[in-house]
Image: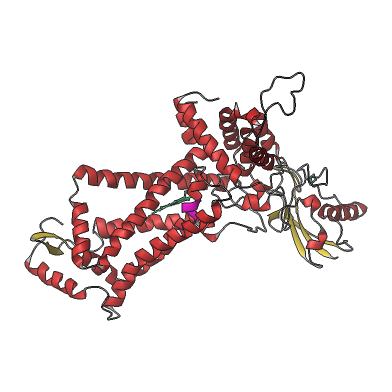
Amino acid sequence: MKLKLKIWRQKSVEMEGSLVDYQLADVSPDSSFLEMLDLLNEQMISEGEEPVAFDHDCREGICGTCSLTINGIPHGPQKATTTCQLHMRHFRDGETIVIEPFRARPFPVISDLIVDRAAFDGIVQIGGFITARTGSAPDGNAIPISKGVADKSMDAAACIGCGACVAACKNASAMLFVGAKVAHLNLLPQGAAEKDRRVLSMVSQMDRAGFGNCTNFGECSAVCPKEIPLDVIAKMNRDYATASLKNIFSQVG
Amino acid sequence: MNPFRQLLQSSLGKKYLMALTGVVLAGFVLGHMAGNVQIFLPPEYINTYGHKLQSLPGVALWGIRGFLLLCLAVHVWLAFVLTIENRLARPLRYEAEDTVEATISSRAMPYTGLILLFFIIFHILHYTVRSVYDYSNLPYDLHGEVVHDIYAMMYLGFTHWWVSIFYIIAMSLLCMHLAHGVSSMFQTMGVRNDKWRPFLNKAALAYGWIVYLGFISIPIAVLLTEYGGLPILDKEHIEATQTLAKTLTLIHP
Ligand code: HEM
Ligand code: FES
């Protein structure tokens, strides 16, 4: 395959970036999107140019490190697929592909296509855990959990924190991510004890980081490589409302 | 921080207020439409209805008006705040932006809302304050009591073609606003899930269309009666009112 690439190049957070055109030939339709970029970088290195910086780690669709907004869609056109699992056969020979970083104020561009997603870490650090006694591991089945609840929690726990929801949202809102983290623990008996405190602090942290406000477009869930459902946002909204009322009139758990 | 302030300043707190004021406004427009289509009945009906509303005790009348205006003010204020925050959350837009899921109605919310705001101001000046055209002397004999002839006022108002066109355009924007908003508010309040979402989306669309068709049927009927010669509305009644106006002055408009 032959491709025309328009790639966002930006030296650092402070510098301004722009789209730069590249031509790439002999791309195998069976290669992954990141392998295609590897090919480009090898070519650039051999020509003495600075290669394109992009994020990746597992290349198995499980770590959430890869990113990229491909032709305007985070993780590209293939549904429920991370960029590392996206293959070039989904593109046409001779196609022009625009590659941009995930864009949001809380995700500053560090270099080219790499953005700093530490804002997500901050949200998880403030509430994405349960306060448990350490020491000997508890018996796995000591606390019974019904199948339906376990499934819902598991659906939310599938979130790999890649940030595509923020990147796709027209408001750069992080509510699908935060909803997933809240729902994942709040649904389970182990997490329920701290559900009010968790949702209050995670939403506050999300607001402090400067993410936008959800207006229920549904773009986030549509591009999510793990297909996190919009339900988690409704669940977060519900939990936050009850937690706020308890916070005002009684005592949060 | 004071828990009440924390709620009101949070992204979700603002969204709750947006949804709650949205419920009030959406309920109001449906009721308003249902009241207005009484124009298709003989003049006595809508004039009796209007007279009853106007002769509510001052506290009730102004209480209701004040409450509606307060809801509108909060809704508009938060619309501005949230929309500005959303724009700030993505200072640099994508060069190639695509949309996977979001409907046109959802994306247009700030714009349909803004034009509706101008419409509402005009509409209140036109038919409530009556400062656009003079409708102060339209007497109607309601079982011996001289009351304001709402039937004639509505009819005369819509004989100005530009008023009718503006009204019909504004109502189509209201239809869009409701088509997204009426389902969105359930999600915001945390009472929507993947099972209910398709139904609520359809219900919101139906809600928008019912309000739309109900409202626009009136200017269309007026234009067809006045300029198309179709006997949909009681044109003789308008002439009779104008004759009566020459001999009788309305005591309380
Ligand atoms: C009759 C007048 C109006 C009605 C019935 C109405 C109704 C609604 C409803 C039901 C919602 C959904 C709330 C939610 O998603 O939780 C909404 C949202 C919204 N409205 Fe209105 N509204 C009206 C006027 C306005 C005006 C005058 C403006 C702006 C100047 C406005 C701007 C917005 C915006 C920006 C949203 C948020 C979009 C979103 O969350 O999806 N609306 N409205
Ligand atoms: S690199 Fe790990 S998910 Fe793509």
Q: Quadrant of the C terminus of chain B?
A: bottom left
Pick the residue in front: B81 or B242.
B242
Q: Residue at x 19, y 53 (%)?
A: B52
Residue B134 visible (yes or no): no
Residue A236 visible (yes or no): yes
Q: How many marks?
A: 0
- Main secondary structure found in the magenta portion: helix
* Image position, residue A27 (x, y; %): 87, 61
- Residue B89's place in the image compared with B124, above or below, is above
* Image position, residue B178 (x, y; %): 45, 56
Q: Residue at x 22, y 62 (%)?
A: B46
The residue lying furthest to the right in this view is: A46
Q: Quadrant of residue B243?
A: bottom left
Pick the residue in front: B161 or B212.
B212
Pick the residue in front: B190 or A128.
B190
Residue B239 is left or right of residue B178, and the answer is left
Residue B165 is left or right of residue A1, and the answer is left
The residue lying furthest to the bottom in this view is: B229
Q: Is residue A24 one of those drawn in magenta?
A: no
The color scheme shown is: secondary structure
Pick the residue in front: B22 or A139.
A139
- Residue A113's place in the image compared with B202, above or below, is above
**Range of the magenta residues?**
B179-183
* Image position, residue B231 (x, y; %): 25, 78
* Image position, residue A123 (x, y; %): 64, 34
Q: Is residue B180 one of those drawn in magenta?
A: yes
